[in-house]
Image (spheres, grey):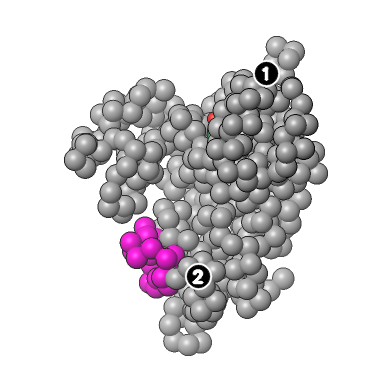
Amino acid sequence: MSAPLLPGVGAHGGLIALGVMGGGQLGRMFVHAAQQMGFATVVLDPDAHSPAGLVSHKHIQTAYDDPQGLAQLAQYAVAVTTEFENVPAPALRQLAAQRPVAPSADAVAIAQDRAAEKAHFDRCGVPCAPYAVIASDTQLAEVPDALLPGILKTARLGYDGKGQIRVANRAELAAAWDELKRVPCVLEQRLQLLDECSVVVARGADGALVHLPPQRNLHRDGILAVTEVFEENLPQALAESAVSAAKSIAIGLQYVGVLCVEFFVVPDGKGGTRLVVNEMAPRPHNSGHYSIEACDVSQFDLQVRTLAGLPLPQPRQHSPAIMLNLLGDIWGPNGENPPWDRVLALPGAHLHLYGKLSARPGRKMGHLTLTAPTVAAVRANALAAAALLGIAPF
Ligand code: ATP
Ligand code: MG
């Protein structure tokens, strides 16, 4: 175990800096957490207006695989993390030759590929939806009937339901694979979802492992819409098995960093319910944003701590919370802003806007977390906020 990287002034007379690959909203919230703790930050992202680049001490504007950009990042940062799973694994390997990198290139490479990810879940003994890999005509022909109706998903580069096509039969499957340009895909059986949930865990290089309370998630059109976190948001036994499955998945990867595992709740065929794992994200997750205000340590604080080798006390949620995603759809046709003043009049409303300049349907522009002393109050305020914003009730 190497010594922890403490925030403050380094031997060079400047602040010790933490680096992040990617400048989206997750990177921005990592930067905020790192800066709060006294670190300087450096973001690598090609976009001049990236949400994280805008608030970081330093922003390196190169491609993710640019050797010079990566060399600059390694020179300035004492350790490097990532905020999106599609960062090229070779870039993380280049960085790791010089600096601690968490999560590791190997763990990210598994999370980037649905086929490798599912094989990992199998190895950990955590069930996922029945599936088949389709990367050749033979595999396409050999797909078992039991997987239909199904969802064809590209093995790589999908997010927010992109790169996914629902198929009812073999003809649709063949057409969908053509539409996805015959890239390697997985076909998943379409499950009857009773619910969805996710768990954020954080694991240190010393093996310390902590978790945030399981989140209950509502998706609309393949995009996370609402996350609810409070006691009894999920049956106790399901919540416990989600936490232990997420922990086995992290341990199986020898993971260092913050990992979010998404689950489906499905009928068990015996009148009860069971969990199947959907996918994992090797980073903080949209469903964990509530932890910023509702927990004593947020998922971004955990990312800073795991990266710097700092202690990981078990987080505690101190307020019931509901998070509403703010998609571009709620802006007016000419970019008119939603009525933030009215939303902010609600007690316990915490508005996060990511600094994106143009609102497009489906684009994640920000999120709103509501906290309250009771579940009834947080629900009432979240529904009031949704009504003000034109978000359908839940
Ligand atoms: P993100 O990375 O943003 O979470 P994604 O593009 O990786 O999304 P998935 O998590 O695979 O997408 O799927 C998005 C949503 O689509 C799920 O949360 C779920 O609501 C629905 N879905 C996905 N797979 C299945 C399935 N096998 N059966 C039923 N519904 C599914
Ligand atoms: Mg998902």
- Would you say 338 lies left or right of 365 here? left
Quadrant, the N terminus: bottom right
153 relative to 157, above or below: above
Residue 193 in the image, given as x and y percentages of width and height: 59, 23
Q: Give the range drawn in magenta.
A: 38-61
Could one spot residue 151 in this view of the protein? no
Number of on-image labels? 2
| Image height of 233 relative to 24, above or below | above
Residue drawn at (45%, 71%) of the image? 62
Residue at which label 2 appears: 18
Q: In this view of the protein, which residue sits in the foreground, 277 or 208?
A: 277
Q: Residue 305 carries which label?
A: none
Q: Nearer the viewer, residue 297 or 329?
A: 329
Residue at left 45%, top 29%?
A: 220
Helix, strand or loop under label 2 = strand
Q: Report the residue marked by disc 1.
A: 267
Return the residue nearer the eye: 127 or 169.
169
Residue at the far top: name it.
271
Q: Which residue is drawn at 56% across and 55% down?
A: 86
